[in-house]
Image (spheres, rainbow, N blue to C red):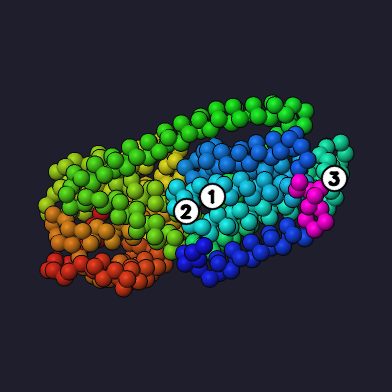
Amino acid sequence: MDPSPLSPQARKFLWIVSGTTLALTVATGIGRLESALILPNARQIAPMIFAIAAIVLGRFYPVCLGEKIRAQVSEIVTFAAILLFHPLTAALIAAMGCALYYGIQMFTSRWPPYILIFNTAQHSLATLLSGLAYHGFHDSVQFHLATPFDLSRLVAAATIYVAANWSLSVTFSGLVQGRNPLSLGISLWKRTWILEVSGPFLGVILAIVYLYAPIAAALLVIPFIAVHQSYQASVLLRNQTRETLELLADTVDQRDPYTYQHSIRVAEHARALAERLGLPPDEVDTIALAARVHDLGKIGVPDGLLLKPQTLTASELEEIRRHTTLGANIVSKLPQYRQGKECILYHHERYDGSGLFGLSGKQIPLGARIIAVADAFDAMTSHRPYRQALPVQAALQELQKEKGRQFDPEIVDVFIEMMLEREQKEPELVSPPHPSEPSKIAL
């Protein structure tokens, strides 16, 4: 294993989880190896092999419920194994399924080895803890739902399985990405809690089907494939819609050679700024998505106005800024852009309230305030028909000057700090000095 990609904290957590999994497995297996792990007949070996294969295939073909939300069929199979097998056997099934999947990815997609080690340990530990909560330390394994006590054991096992998997995964992801695991976990939980909670209980259904009709359990693969294909088509449609809008936004940029790739750069700045402000991942994605098409409404602005070689008058500025309304109306028809609609609509509002809609301060959506700063910076550092591009330092000074008037002071401070740090790492970011007339922050 090459530990270089990991921070010291992430590496330490990796070894803690791996060591805990190994220690608990050994402690649980002492004196029970023959009864728990040596399977005496093909009736038990066959479902184990089927479960391992289902876990691997389930990870390769998740049910897509959104652009970044995947329902893992493998979790359903794993929880069914928890109910049907001894905790050690269930942990073995989970470990082998994860090891096979991540091992294949490591060799075919060059995933780093630590992903294989951590995920195998994580799922084994969660499975073992859940199995012990349901079956205890007894050698005999019984799954039935005849009494309230049986139900309470089931709820306890499901809760431990979800909590252990979730907390371990989010903590490690946060340490690897250098983000707060708690805020990361809360953000992801809001979007995926229904999947996390429903997985174990779908596993209960799978276990019941297996007990009463083992062959029917295998046939459940067919509806899962159908659901997978259906959601894949839905996700494909959403992706194609996004790509079409982005292509349209790029086409708008290309009308003016001075603003080519403007929307791409604004989206990059907006994403980096939102992350710097510590916003949850889903909010960062919403803002970046809106920034990518923030000028889409300029498709309705005449070329004579958009490409005017002279400085725009106040009335012309007012007219061109109305493109935000058209852009917001276009994206409001599409589900993946609805949350970012207001970011597009209000990204030319002024912090002091003198903008088109009269919003001021915190009345302006946070995403719109972020895009406003990113948009203005890229505009000032790009050549325009009526002026040369400003050097980065001069553009940052203009942002500083407009704090509290055109821009949110806190966002400007964070953006300037971010850009100065980037300037130290990437000196080429600074534009060469050249003469220019006094800047007026452009669109």
Estimate the x, y position of residue 226 in percent, counting from the top left: 55, 27
**The C terminus appears in which quarter of the rendering?**
bottom left
Residue interval drawn in magenta: 29-38
Q: Amino acid at mark 2?
A: Trp
Mark 2: secondary structure: loop
Residue 345 lies, in percent from the top left, at 37, 47
Query: Are discs 1 and 3 less than 8 Å apart at CB?
Result: no
Label 3: how many Cα within 10 Å (few below 14, some 14–19, many 20+): few
**Is residue 30 located in the magenta-colored stretch of the structure?**
yes
Does label 3 or label 2 sit earlier along the sequence? 2
Tag 1 and tag 2, C-beta contact below 8 Å: yes
- Residue at 18%, 47% in the rendered image: 256
| Residue under label 3 | 140
Q: Nearest the camera: 16 or 69?
A: 16
Query: In the picture provided, is 341 more to the left or to the right than 436?
Result: right
Work out how far the residue at label 3 is from the one at label 2, CA to CA, in angstroms. Answer: 39 Å
